[in-house]
Image (spheres, helix red, strand yellow):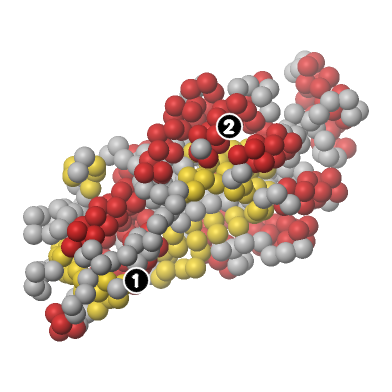
Amino acid sequence: MLLVYTHKITHRNKYIFNLLFKDILGIDFKLTPDREEFKLYEGAKLSYTNSPIGDELFFVSRNLLFETGITEQNISVLEFNNNKVFFATGKASVFPFDIFAASFYLVSRYEEYLPHIRDEHDRFDAKDSLAFMNGFLQKPMINIWTGWMKKILIQKFPELVFPEKKYEFISTIDIDNAYAYREKGLARTVGGYLKSLSTFNIPELAERTQVLLGNEKDPYDTYDFQLDILKKFKFKSIYFFLLGDYGVNDKNLPIESKKFQSLIKMLGDYADIGIHPSYGSNKSKEQLKKEVSRLSKVLHRDITKSRQHFLKLTLPETYRNLIDLDIIDDYTMGFATQVGFRASICSTFNFYDLDNEVETKLRIHPFVIMEGTLKYHMNVHPEDALQKIKPLIDEVRAVNGVFISLWHNDTINNQNIWQGWQKAYEEMVKYATT
């Protein structure tokens, strides 16, 4: 066991020590504010305080983990071990930066609580993040820093046993619109025909007709392909279904559709199923509750997984609403406009509510890439997509983390603007699993 001395035990330092030592490194530890207990302890130990007690591993502490509330932090990013660090501490410390405070700042999403300009969908923009502005958004810095910690501990205390961590890949797919033409209902189907006619889109009109007559497969029906890839490469997959009321940004099928319900149940035989809270639910807890209930009734089981539609995430309100509805795993942590590590980590972690200064039981699963980000925001062509994805997978492999991707059923139909992206998805899966 590792004994950690700190002059004051707080919710913040308990949280970050637990994340780094127990969750990521897999070792037991004990926190103590008792100097005598620390001096007498003969096993592995380190101190996190203002000055060393003896000749132990000593980490200089900055103020962040001993504060409460949210204030603007004076951050200067430095280079160390060919990587970026911040919260400098000087030469007396094992590392010339406060690894614990820096990790807490990133993983708690401290900067997202500070005043900032939100984008058109009321989201924190990737370009406003410390990681993007300082060139480390595409590196899981917390995992990298913790790896440095592990090496130091092994050198000093070879008797410490670290369990082997294994890299993992998880494919997640959002079902915003299960079918392009099927199961839309009379009003939406007629509206679709009128729109095609008004824009003289004859190919779309003809395709809709052939699909509805049963002569062609719906272009968004890519589920056979997805399941073939799942069977071929054997990986974990999760589907998130949008079950909101129809609106400008929420256009999935009505839950009353029996074929839609059958699709949800069928995919649930092969993968985990989660709720995809609608755009409209982000401001309405009652709407969110309704959508979770809809999915629960279809599957006849509790719903515990979630990812926000449009990645709409407002801290801490969004996560508090999920917690109130007994959601225990959320997959929203990632940026819409940039690939990389929004929280600078590729391990799961518990959400820390900064407003209430408490660690919650909501487990956050950060994703790394979304195909829409590559296409729409980074202007990547499908034949070049893997070259953007490979380095991210390599970063995750190097620290034995979890690589989570985000795709949509309609983007792997290999048609129109998404031609070539089906192959890109398969290439990503193959590289991520072999």
* Image-based side of 96 in relation to 304, left or right: left
* Image-based side of 187 in relation to 54, left or right: right
Residue closer to the observer: 247 or 433:
433
Residue annotated with mark 2 = 425
Residue 269 visible in the snapshot: yes
Residue annotated with mark 1 = 28
At 8% from the left and 59% from the top, the residue drawn is 92
Residue closer to the observer: 224 or 216:
224
Q: What kind of element bears circle 1? A: loop
Task: Give coordinates of residue 376: x percent, y percent.
Answer: 52, 28
Tell me where residue 412 sits by quadrant: top right
- The residue sitting at the right extreme is 213
Could you tell which of marks 1 and 2 lies nearer the N-terminus?
Answer: 1
Amino acid carrying label 2: it is: Tyr
Residue closer to the observer: 189 or 261:
261
- Which mark is on residue 409? none
Residue 16 visible in the snapshot: no
Amino acid carrying label 1: it is: Asp
* Label 1–label 2 contact, CB within 8 A: no
1 vs 2, front mark:
1
* Image-based side of 119 in relation to 85, left or right: right
What is the count of numbered marks? 2
Q: Is residue 251 above or below residue 109?
A: above
